[in-house]
Structure formats: C-alpha cells, structure tokens
Amino acid sequence: RGEDDDTNARSAPRGEDDDTNAQRAKRRRAAPAPSDGAIDAADLRLLESLPRELGLREFRFLARGHKGVVYVANYAYAGRTGRVAIKVCRDGGARQEERWLRRCNELDIGASLVSAEDDCVVMEYVEGPSIGEALDGAVPPGVLFKALRDLLGQCSRLDQQGWDKREMNRCQKHVIVSREGRSTLLDFERCQESAKPCNVTGLAQYLTQAWAVGKLR
C-alpha cells in the first residue's frame, strides 16, 4: 500500500505537466483575439497616419509574428462599416505581403486587400477558429470537412499558378475557418514563385499528422 501511495504521489505532478503541455499546445493552435494590450508608440503613429478616408478607429492589438505586428480596427468606408486587420511589417515586408495578397485575391484566396502603405497592409478581418482549433473540435465535422475541401482547392490553385506559400505543412494558425466552411489563408509574406510548389503536399503532410493523432477519424 505504501508503494502505491508513493507511485500516486509521484505520478500526480506528471499529470499536471501533461495538462500544462496540452494547454500550451492548444494556445499555439488558437487564432488570436483582439486585446486591450498597449500599442507600440511608433506603430500607433503609423496607424493614425493611414488615409482618413478609410475611417479607421479603435485600434486594438491582435498578434505578434516573426516579421510584424497585427492590429484590428473598426472602419467606415464607402458606405460600409466593419473591421479590418492591419499588418505592420517594416523592411519591405508590407509590400511583399501586398503583392502576394493582391495576386492571391484574384484566385479568390486570402482575406480581401483593402489598402497598403510602405510599412503596413490593411485587409479584411476574418473571424473564426484557426484550422488547428477546428481540428480540435471547434466546428462541427461537416463544417470541418467542407473547409478542408475548400482549403485543398485553394492549395491546388496555388500549385497550378506555380506559387508556393511555403508553410502549409504547419498551417495550424495560418488558416481561419468560417461557420459556413470557408477557409481563409493568412500571411503571404513568404510566398514565392516556384517550379515545384508544394502547397497540396504540405497540406497533406499537416493533415497526415492530424490523422495520426486521431483528429480526422
């Protein structure tokens, strides 16, 4: 009995660690949500200098990536109102993102481009769970498989154009799934032309990993 008690005592912390690791992994897969975190002063000046005709207001922090920071704002433009995402990325990253997002929009891929400046890109703000969260059960199975078919079609169109997004094998946070089963690809600054694009192959690798741990069964 004493040995059992010792074993239980030793195993309890490991269970807590497992829970913590699972929670961390879930956060890594989660789509970011707007927050009231402080906005960098230089970024705020840049945001406030965007064209007045866009009617941008109420800037909020959304996410920080390897090459930039994303904010959300309300807008009133051309008789329409809603929310946009503003990606601030200096050192030429914004123009790279704009170029590829504009080209992908022509294939009905990506969030709709609204405006772009030298250091930032303004685009449609797409709400919904990430593909990683969708695979975790955030959407019904029917919606998930509809979104996966849509995503596969988009990857196929990119391959046909000879454009490689370069991250489909780890796309858990780079795809947003709508309630209707629409997939929206995000982050195009690493996109490039390629004689051997591997968007479909990369997505297949990602989904194979998901299947291996039971998320597609």
Image: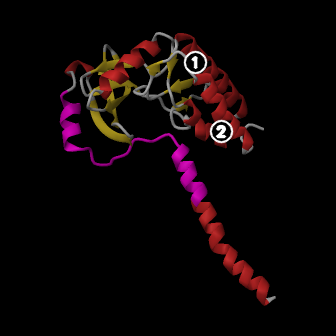
Q: Going by the picture, which residue comes out furthest to the front?
A: 195
Residue 214 location (% of width, % of height): 75, 43
Q: Name the mark on residue 154.
A: 1
Q: Quadrant of the N terminus?
A: bottom right
Q: Which residue range is magenta in the image?
A: 21-49
Disc nearest the viewer among 2 and 1: 1
Q: Is residue 41 left or right of residue 201?
A: left
Q: Going by the picture, which residue comes out furthest to the right?
A: 1
Colouring style: secondary structure
Which residue is at a point 57% across and 28% down the rendered structure image?
A: 178
Relative height, residue 86 to residue 156 (above, below): below
Callout 1, which amino acid?
A: Gln
Q: Is residue 44 magenta?
A: yes
Q: Which is nearer the N-term, disc 2 or disc 1?
A: 2
Indicate the quadrant where residue 129 lies.
Answer: top right
Q: Name the mark on residue 135.
A: 2
Callout 2, which amino acid?
A: Leu
